[in-house]
Image (cartoon, rainbow, N blue to C red):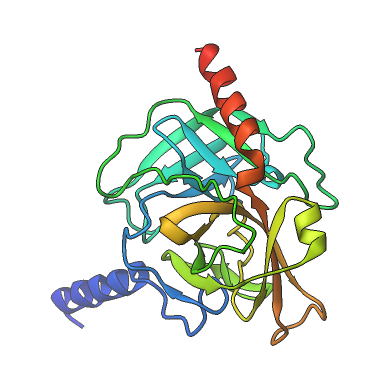
Amino acid sequence: MSALCKAAVAAVILVLALDCEVHTEAVIGGREAVPHSRPYMVLLQRDGKKEFCGGFLLSEDFVMTAAHCQAKFYTVKLGLHNIQQNDYQQRINVDQAFPHKNFNETLRINDIMLLKLGSKAKLNSKVQPIALADWNEESLPKSCSISGWGRTKWKEGFLSNCLMEGNVTLINDERCARFNLYCSMGSTGSGNGDSGGPLVCEDNKAFGVVTSCYTEKDKPGALLFCKFSKIENYRDWITSTIERALKKV
């Protein structure tokens, strides 16, 4: 094979490697998101390793994620779609982490955390904050979705190259309500690596934080039961934590 042909083959292989993987499943039961259609999404790298969580941008200074995503240090990645490409990526270290003081890792309740960025995020068409819901209705919010770069198959596979999304239907569950949670059940749910991402519902606002998903029988094919920290019940904590963090600047 000539040197020219070898170079052409290598270029094709590189392009294929950087493309989004083709999935029949996504987030677990969803699809690939339209690139940059969710400009609030954050990929959170923990302790400089291949350990990731999701998150979402609240302002130039703050990201929200799950408290069980705690680490010694974090790198926030913004403006992503394909994690193999760096065209629009912003990388910002976290200055301070504020997990909820009543977080219970065993029960995964109060599983919510604020991260103060070490430098301001540069807002543009690919990087934008999301508004938080203030839902006081008795009925559950509708038209809800989740997104992330986590595993697309239950307990197997690797992180998705591209941002995936899926629709979820919230259910009435007294246990969930008692612990400040929204819950969903169905064939779609978050995978390993999606924790901390937003539950987005009506008016395209963040209603919850992805906490966990599991199946009753813990095997493929079973329905996924997912839990989300209910943001409306933490509005006072969010406001006071942000105000306290900004006063220290």
Q: Nearer the viewer, residue 151 or 203?
A: 203
Q: Position of residue 52 (x, y in %)?
A: 58, 52
Q: Position of residue 153 (x, y in %)?
A: 61, 77
Q: Position of residue 62 (x, y in %)?
A: 49, 33
Q: Residue at x 76, y 57 (%)?
A: 177
Q: Quadrant of residue 226?
A: bottom right
Is residue 143 positioned above or below 80 on the image? below
Is residue 225 positioned above or below 1 on the image? above
Q: Residue at x 51, y 73 (%)?
A: 167
Badge count: 0
The reply to whether residue 190 is in sight is yes
The residue furthest front is 138
The reply to whether residue 73 is in sight is no
Q: Position of residue 25 (x, y in %)?
A: 52, 81
The residue furthest left is 4
Q: Is residue 200 left or right of residue 237?
A: left
Q: Quadrant of residue 183?
A: bottom right
Q: Residue at x 38, y 59 (%)?
A: 84
The residue furthest right is 106
Q: Residue at x 69, y 42 (%)?
A: 67
Q: Is residue 103 left or right of residue 28?
A: right
Q: Quadrant of the N terminus?
A: bottom left
Q: Nearer the viewer, residue 9 or 183?
A: 183
